[in-house]
Amino acid sequence: MALIGKQIVAIFLLSVSAAPALGAGSCIDVRMPEAVQCEGRLTHKIFPGPPNFENVRKGDKPEPTYILELQKPVCVKGDDSIDENKLIDRVQIFSEPESAENRALFKKLRSLIGKTIVVKGTAPFGAITGHHHAPLLLPITEIMSSR
């Protein structure tokens, strides 16, 4: 294969692997800096937090959590805490409340519980602590209507 042909194939493969929209069989590469977009039904649950992570009624701190149940499971690569050979169907989404814009995003989530939404975010990572309640976590930057 000529050098130009190999370059075209390489560019095509890079563009396919970096595509932000996720479809069936798609993988999220957490090492990539591009935004990630996920679609699913938004749920809300109170999980038990410290000190024992077992039961809120017995004194554990409540941890209200938003989980996006994905319409199409995806694989995740680039994170040692997630087996890239297994598909995940849940993403814990959150908004860092450091700015007024992010606080508005967080507030908007409450009104969308039970609805199918599309979220966009950057820097996803695998669950590694007792505060993480889905295999993948995604700090969101945008909420959009479902298609």
Image (cartoon, grey):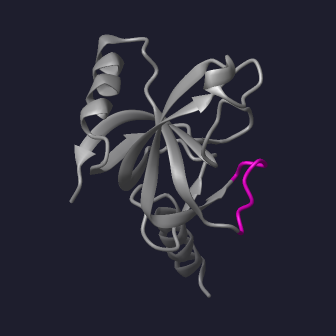
Q: Position of residue 91 (x, y in %)?
A: 52, 47
Task: Compare residues 28 and 131 and report the one nearer the observer.
Answer: 131
Write the residue at 36% across / 55% down: 39
Secondary structure that dominates the magenta span = loop
Vertical relation: 87 (above or below) 3: above
Is 53 placed left or right of 119 in the picture? right
Residue 128 on the magenta span: no
Q: Quadrant of the C terminus?
A: bottom left
Is 146 placed left or right of 47 in the picture? left
Query: Which range is magenta?
Result: 78-85
Residue 84 on the magenta span: yes
Vertical relation: 100 (above or below) 127: above
Q: Position of residue 1 (x, y in %)?
A: 62, 88
In the figure, residue 123 lies in which quadrant? Answer: top right
Q: Position of residue 90 (x, y in %)?
A: 53, 53
Vertical relation: 125 (above or below) 7: above
Vertical relation: 77 (above or below) 114: below
Write the residue at 56% across / 25% down: 63
Task: Compare residues 68 and 79 and report the one nearer the observer.
Answer: 68
Q: Position of residue 34 (x, y in %)?
A: 47, 45
- All told, the count of numbered labels is 0
Write the residue at 31% across / 33% down: 109
Task: Compare residues 90 and 102 and report the one nearer the observer.
Answer: 90
Task: Compare residues 16 and 60 and report the one nearer the observer.
Answer: 60
Direction bottom: furthest residue: 1
Write the residue at 36% across / 53% down: 41
